[in-house]
Image: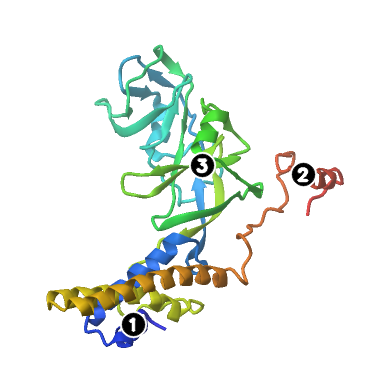
Amino acid sequence: MTVDDVARSSLAAVGSNAGLLQAIKWTSDRYRQLSNRGKLRALRRIDQLVIPAAITDGTATFTRGTDIVTGDATAQAVWRTGISVVNSDNAPNSIDQSIVGRYIRYRRVWYKVTNLEPDGLGGVQIRLHNPVAEDSSTAVNYKLVQRHTRLPKDARFLGGFVQQRLWRPLAQLSISELDLTAPERLFVAGTGPESWTVIGDDEDGVRLIEFYPYTLRNEAILFTYYAKSPDLTPGTNLPDDLDIESLKMGVLIDVYRYEMSQSLRANQVEVASVWRNELRAQETTWRNRMEELFRVDRMDDEVKTILHTQGPPVFGDFTFIRTARQDAISRLGNFP
């Protein structure tokens, strides 16, 4: 079944001359309304992202009141590549190798990196979003981390996140909860993140996630999300398990509204009143059908997608122990 079939059926139901392309646009809008109301299984995706390891190579110099950070030769070399040498862990090619947008810290404050630019001496230097607000320090250790991670552009609703190295599910926190439990965000751990929170949207509308604690090594994260409904164009196939008749109930609202406006333009007030009454009744029908569509969509599905979290732990790392059962199994020297 295609979007054209729903559009034609809706127009034929009342003999409307609204036009097929317009009806297809109405069908696309109603499907988007449905997908924004809840999580449709047809739009669920399973994806993976990689958090790059913290860069701590070399030393850097920070001067109070300036927005420029300089580094020694070792630091400059990894700033160019965006991949740490001392903390690298077979970094996949999928890692964003630009340090622009990451954050750097040498004392307690995180400063956002806005540019990596030539220093005029054949090397590179970091430009910060804000000037350094702490005491000047020369040739000191630092940490450069990716605090905010971009998700796929089509992400609408988010599901679960799992750290794959330890097969550990990450806890979801609101930004207020994370600010309350870790306002300083100073922890950069070798065990990787334990929680995630939605920061908001980037300048181009892409969803941003903060994983905490920040990681010393590259971490692969497996996650689920529900995609935004795409614009349905002529010939687009609709999901097989979507009740087409129910979707048509939503398109009929727009057909009735079109016929009502046409009658008013023709000064047929009584006919327009009939279309208005039909429109209002159809809105109620559409709300009921949307609830029915979601119930049917979840009938043979689990409450949520369960990502695998029972893999073997890294030797000597017991952060995977979260329950009494896991603790008992770990004492036997093995883990399922």
Q: Which residue is mark 1?
A: 10
Circle 2 residue: 323
Disc 3: which residue: 197
- Quarter holding the N terminus? bottom left
Q: Which residue is located at x 32 percent, y 21 percent?
A: 131
Residue 118 is drawn in which quadrant?
Answer: top left
Is the image coloured rainbow, by chain, by secondary structure, or in one colour?
rainbow
Which amino acid type is marked by label 2?
Thr
Report the number of numbered marks. 3
Q: Secondary structure at mark 3?
A: strand
Mark 2 → mark 1, Cα distance in angstroms: 54 Å
Mark 1 or 3, closer to the camera: 1
Q: Quadrant of residue 244?
A: bottom left
Give me the residue at 63% from left, 48% from top.
169
Q: Reading the chain from its start, which is encountered first: label 2 or label 1?
A: 1
Q: CA distance from mark 1 to mark 3?
A: 42 Å
Q: Position of residue 186 (x, y in %)?
A: 53, 26
Q: Amino acid at mark 3?
A: Thr
